Amino acid sequence: MASVRVRIAIATNALGKAVSGHTIETKLEAVKRHGFDGVELAFEDLESHAALGEYDGLSGREDRLRAAAADIKSKATALSLEIIAVNPFVSYDGLVELADIEERLQEAELWLQLLQILEAPILQICSCIYPLEKTITPDIHKIAANMRRLGELALKYDKIVAYEAIAWGIHIDTWQQIQDIVALVDLPNVRHCLDTFHIAAKEAGDPFNKSSPIRPGGLENLQASLDEMKKTIRPSDIGYFQLSDATVADPEQKNYPRRDFNQPSYMTQSRNCRIFPCEPSRYGGSLPALEVAKTVFELGYRGWVSLEAFHTDMWKTDASALEVMETITVDVLVCGGGMSGLACAAFAAESGAKVLVVEKQASIGGSSLYSAGMFWGPRDYEALRQWVPDGDRELQRAWMDDYLPAVEWMRQMGVPTSQRFSPIMTIGVGYPIKIPHLHDLHLRRIKNSATGSEVWTRTQVIKLLQDNEIPGSRVSGAIIQRWSSNGQDPQYLKVRAKRVVLATGGFQGSSDLTSKHLGPGADNIFVRSNQGSVGDGLNLASSAGAGNSRGMGTYYGHLLAAPLRREAVTPYDFLPLAQYQSRHCLLINESGRRFTDETLGDEVVNQYLAKQDNRRGFLLFDDKTRRKHCVSALFPNAGDVDRLAKARSHGCNVASAPTLDGLVKILEGWGVNGQQARHTIEQYHRAVTSNDAKISLDVPVGRAGPPPDSLLDGEADFFAMEVQPSITFSYGGIAIDRNGHAITADKAPIPGLLVAGVDAGGFSNLGYAGGLALAFVTGFWTARTIARELGLVEPKLPSIAPEDRDLTARASL
């Protein structure tokens, strides 16, 4: 599944036991140090803080707790931490005796008052567990009545009651029972508290079986439970979500701090063996906790996630109990191992920086692996400004200054580079290069730098670390998630870095971000890029206080043969299925009308097609155009391919007829207004073959080149091909300056945070300003900035080659 962005908290009793001397101050500082967003406050920590001598002047328990809560809130606020819940309220849900119920409700009201002081939204309650001397009932209707009273009381304080089924609950031990009770309560503030340990252990675990910690049929039981959950629970039904794993428990309880041979086996495991998720290499996690987590996120839940660990290590008296993640230190953390990320890493490593590249996919390269290697740029700055007038002038000028030196760098470094090819992308010149060779070169440069630099795949950044967690403040590292080669048991690590570079490849794969920025229905546009480009960089930068560039609603892509679904195509078919010949064809919509100037190029008309009804387009051309533009290589490295035959092999709508009347009938069979299509063809013919200014077209033609030939003067056969829009990467992105710094909406650089490649916006805007070459150059910029700011050897690009100086001479005329 795609990466999920949530806020992460941690339970304070997972950071060392209060009875072992771990104070709330040291715990909150540890929480802040390790990059969490908030805490789930254990009541034992509140009571321990209230017992301090500074509260001796307060006589009653309630007054001491209130004063302690106010102090804890103040300390958390100073560290920019939120308190999300107080836990666990126990021994209530199944009570029978009225006096017992009233006594616990009185205590609950105190807890709710403390929540008010703490500004915490959630009161967490557990199902009744061993040991309990009170009389309790298994009747869910009576339990629901009790829970309704608690919910109504919480409503007075505007608080949520999060109800958790404990795996060894006396009567209530499954989430399904909680669901039934919550439905009977029927209050919006009484919700689930879902916990991966309790669900996975109850359904699948064998707590004492070291050789087989999952009991026979356990995984099947769990999957059935999770399938039921998908059909039953809504995201709004969840108060919050707790995440943990567990090791196998020792039935003899050797070296356990508190031994109790009468307690249920799940309780022994939970109290002594609960570990943080994804750390099997350290402790040996045994439960399918991540399957539960995956299901909860697939439900659409995006609320608080709290980590819980109740391990024997939590009883240690030294500071090691507070260290929840391994920390590594580097000079530079590069997020993304594609065209720009690898360029940045290689230049920075050669300058003397210790670099860690993290790439979320199994191999490096990103979307550049699927390209034809056209290392292109605008022929000069003036052409770029005319084509993309809404781009950032300073960024565009800096890009043009370094484009041709980057071409010469390729040649000098031995990257196979073809002769200049033009025109390309309407305003450009290009030099096809061998992308795999370039990536191999970067990896060798990183390895041979003698800086200890590394490239990790299957690893992604999930959170940036900032000074004081204040947006716009210095970025000092990140929390990363690293998956094993078998896709199981990820490890979380904290990376301390002097500079962090975001180069994650844009947001085109995110349905949320494309809908937000590109408009309604954009989440259904065909995505012709790697599956990892889902806006990680944009989300991370936004959370750090960065602003957005202009042009967030524009993007690069090509007209693709249609109908065609993404899952039916391998990425290596993206290129031959793109219909680059569109500038030489008529392009009409379902209504039979032209809607754009075809000469703008398919990377521009592609965006206009996305705004048409049903996003269906139809290219019309004759056999001369087919022979000249549809069956040969567009440029070196692109390969000879018959684009029509390729489209037919994928079941797309491609057809021909010996006459235009026959062509119109084909269009009508595809749902096009044939009468209007015929009128469009004839009107276009009159407009382009006469000088009569009175002949009007739906859209003018010829802004960027010669108009397509008239079909009425064409050579039979006549062809029609259905096309659809696609998106390769987003033009808009994180706002940057010419040195690659991420900047706020007020143009202030965010210290420690740089951006490269498609994550950086400002260069293109409807018109296309550059792809592979621009990614390489922005990667170089970030490395150069890093070297300057860290006092390292500054990387440089060579001078423009003599054979390319005609371009600069032309620009100066």
Image: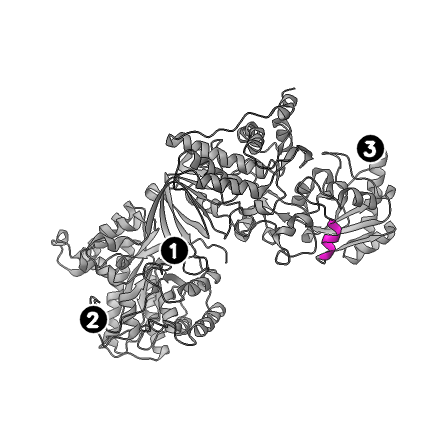
Q: Quadrant of the C terminus?
A: top right
Residue at 22 percent across and 57 percent down: it is: 46
Of badges 2 and 3, nearer the viewer stands 2
Dot 2: what SS?
loop
Mark 1 Cα shell of 10 Å, populated few (<14), some (14-19), many (≥20): many
Which residue carries the number 1 mark?
491
403 vs 442: above or below: above
What kind of residue is marked 3? Answer: Ala
Q: Position of residue 496 (x, y in %)?
A: 35, 43
What kind of residue is marked 1? Answer: Gln
Of badges 1 and 2, nearer the viewer stands 1
792 vs 679: above or below: above
Alpha carbons under labels 3 and 1: distance apart: 69 Å
Going by the image, does 91 lie left or right of 163? left
Q: Position of residue 10 (x, y in %)?
A: 32, 56
- Asked where in the image residue 690 lies, by quadrant, the reply is top right
What kind of residue is marked 2? Answer: Arg
| Of pointers 2 and 3, the one earlier in the residue sequence | 2
Seen from the viewer's position, the closer of residues 737 and 636 is 636
Which residue carries the number 2 mark?
259
Seen from the viewer's position, the closer of residues 623 and 525 is 623
Asked if residue 240 lies in the magenta stretch, the reply is no
Prevailing SS of the magenta stretch: helix
Q: Position of residue 681 (x, y in %)?
A: 82, 45
